[in-house]
Image (cartoon, rainbow, N blue to C red):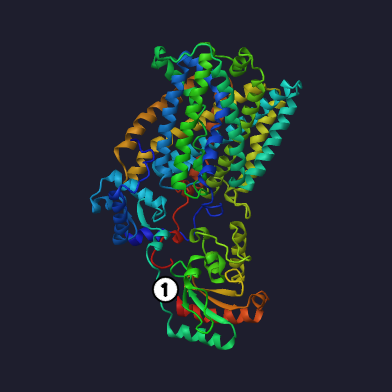
Amino acid sequence: MPNGAMSGLRRRSPVHGLDRRNLGPVEVLAQSVSSAAPAAGMATVPAIVATSAGTATVWSFVLATALAVLVGTCISRFTRRMAAAGSLYSLTAKGLGPAAAFASGTALLAGYTILVMAALTGAAIYLDALLARFGWRAPPVVGAVIVVLLAALAGALVLRGVRVSARIVLAVEAVSIALMLIIFAVLLGSLPVPDPDGGASAGLGTAAAGVLPALGAFIGFEAATTLGVEARRPFRSVPRAVLGTAAVVGLLSVVAAYTQVAGFAGRLGGQPEPVVALAAARGAPWLAVLLDLGIATSFVACTLATANALVRVLFSMGRDGIAPRVLGATHRRYRTPHMAIAVALPVAAAVPAALLVAGVPGPDALRILLTVATAGYLVGYLLVCLAAPLFLRRIGELTPAPVLVTAVTVPALAVACGAFVVSALGGPVPVVLAALLLAALGWFGWLRMRRPAELAAIGVYDETSAADVHLGRLP
Amino acid sequence: MTGIDPLPLSGRQPRAVRSALAMLEEVVAAGPGVTAKEISAALKLPQATTYRLLNLLVDEEYLVRLPDLRGFALGRRAARLAVPVAPVPPTAARAVVDHLRGLVRWGVHLASFVTGQVTLADPDPDHPPTEPVFLARYPHASALGKLLLAGQPDWRALTRDLRRFTEHTVVDGTALDRQLRTVATGALARQCGELRADRGCIAVPIRSPIDGTLVAGLALAGPPHRIAEPNDELVELLREHAERLAPLLA
C-alpha cells in the first residue's frame, strides 16, 4: 500500500497557476462576510421574514442561524481536510460522486452568477435612492450605467487578485456594518417599550415558516471555500471564516430583527422600507441617507466577493474539463483566472442592465434575482450536507457527530427547499428555474456522451504534490 | 460537540502533545499512506481524538494528506525536526570541483540541496564561505539559496525570516519573487553584497540527469563589483563543471 499511495503524487498541483498559499485569515474571512452582505440583509430581510413569521421573526432568525452553523459544520468536514477553489461542488464530489457534484456545480454557478447580478442591481437601486434623497430623480438608464461601471470595476479588482480586492471589500463591508450598527443603536435607544418576548408565544410553527426567507440573509457565507488554494493556512482559516460568518451574520440579523419587530410592535410584515419608516417615526430622517449608503456599499462588497467566488468555480470547471478548458487559464502576473473573469462579468452585468433599461422596476428585479439565486445556494447546501458523512466514511474517519448533524440538517434544508418551491409558484421565477434546470440537464447529457472521463473525475482540488512530502530526500 | 473547531491545545495538556508526537512517529514507522484508522488502532487512541490531532498536524504542515485523502505522509515541515545530513560527495565529484578551483582565482563552493536546505558539501578551503548556519537559515540572501528557492513550487515554505544583512539584501517578498523567477528562467543566481557587503556570488544549478530534479549548486564567490559584471566566460566554465558534476551527485 505505501508505494501505491505515493505513486499517485503529481509533480505539481492540478490547480497550479493560482496564487497558492498567500492569503491571511482576515482576507479569507472578508470574502465570506462580504458575500453574505450582512448590512444589506439587516435592513431588508426582517420585513420579508415578518410576512411569514409575524412576531416570531426573531426566532426565525435564531433557527436560521442554527441551520447555517450546522451547514457550516458540514462544510468544515471537507475544508479541514482539503483545499479547493471550486466552492461546494469540489467538496461534494469527494462524498457523493460526479452526478451530484455536477448538480451542485451548476446550482452554485447559477447561484453565484445571479447573486452578482442581484448585488449589482441592489447597488444601483440604493445609489439611485441616495441620489433621489439629494433631489435628483435619475432615469432608469442611469441605473444600467451604474451596473456596467460597477461590473467593470469589480472585473478589474478581481483580476488584480484577492489580496487587493479583499482589503477593499473588507473596508467597504466594515463601513456598511458600522453604519448599520449606528442606525440600529439609535433606533434601539429610542424604542418606547422594550418588548423582549419576540414570539415565544407565537409558537415554533410560525417561527419555522420564517426560516426560509431568513436563510436569505446567510447565502454567500460559504464563499471562503473558493479561497482554499490561495489561503496561507487553508485548513484553519477557511472553516473558521465560514463558521464565523454564519455566527456574525446570525447575531447581526437577530439584532436587526429584534429592533424592527419591536419598533413596529408586531406590524413589520410587508413594510417596504421598515428602517426608513422607523427612523422617520423617531424623528431621525437623516438616518435614511446613512442607510442607503450602508446598503449600497454592502451590495458593492457583495458584488466583488461573489465575483471572486464565481470566477473560481468557473476556473475549477475549466480545469475539471467539464467546461471549456480555456476557463481554467490563469493570468501570468496576477495569478487569477482571467479568462473566467472575461466571460463571467460581462454576462453578470448585461442581465441586470438590460432589465433596468427595459423598465423593470429595480426592486422587482432584485427580488426575482435574489429568489433564483437562493434556489441555487439551497441545492448546494443540501448536497454538501448529504456528502459530508459519506466523505468521512470513504476516507475512514467517520464518527457519530457528523451523522447526527446531517440527520438534522438535511431534512430541515429539504423542507426549506420544498417551502421554497411552493412560495415561488407563480410569477417569472419558476420559468427561470425551469430554464436553468433544462440547460443543466442538457449540459450533463452532453458531458455524459462526449466527456465521460472528465465527468467521472470531477472535483479538482489542491492535492498534495511531490514537493509537499518529506521523504528524507528530495522527491 | 458537533465538530466545530476544538479549543487550541494549551501547554497544560501533556497527553495531547505526547499523542501528537506518537502520531508523527507512527507515520514514519508505518510509512506513507497509513490511514487515520490504522494510526488510531496502533496507538490505542480514541478515533475522534486521533482525527482531531491528525487534522491539527496537517494544518501545521508536519503531516500531509495524500491525494486519496485517506493516507498520511510526513510533510516538508517535518524535515525541520531532524538535523539535515547531506551526503558526502564522492571523490570523483571533489576532483571536478578541485579542477575548477585550479582554473579561477575566486572561491569555488559546492552545496547540496537534497535536505531542503543549503548544505555546503565541499566549501573552498582557501576562500572560507559564509558561516554554514547562515546559508541554511537565510537562503534569500545567498546565490546558492536563491537557486534552491527558485527551484521550489512555493519558495515561501522554505523561508522564515527575510532578514536584512546589508543595504542590498532583497527583503521584500514581491521583489524576491520577481528575482527568483529570473533565476529560474536564466538558471543562474547572482548576489552582490546581499549577505556580506564585501562578497558577491554567482551560482548555477546541478540537476539530476535522470529526472531533472535540483540536487545541488555550484558557486563562485568574489568581490561584489566583479561579480556584478556579465562574466560570460566564467559562467560558461561554471556550467561546464556543473554538467560534469550532475551524474556524480544524483
In the depicted structure, whether residue A203 falls above or below residue A152: above
Indicate the position of residue A119 as horizontal and vertical percent values: 61, 31
Q: Quadrant of the N terminus of chain A?
A: bottom left
Quick check: A325 left or right of B83? right
In the depicted structure, whether residue A33 falls above or below residue A16: above
Circle 1 residue:
B86
In the depicted structure, whether residue A30 falls above or below residue A10: above
Any part of residue A379 in sight: no
Q: Chain of mark 1?
A: B
> Residue at point 40% right, 47% down?
A81
**Residue furthest toward the left?**
B44
Q: Nearer the viewer, residue A253 or B160?
A: B160
> Residue at point 24% right, 51% down?
B41
Q: Quadrant of the C terminus of chain A?
A: bottom left
> Residue at point 47% right, 67% down?
B117
Indicate the position of residue B249 as horizontal and vertical percent values: 45, 77
In the depicted structure, whether residue A462 falls above or below residue B232: above
Quick check: B185 left or right of A453? right
Q: Nearer the viewer, residue A77 or A27?
A: A27
Q: Secondary structure at mark 1?
A: loop
Any part of residue A233 in sight: yes
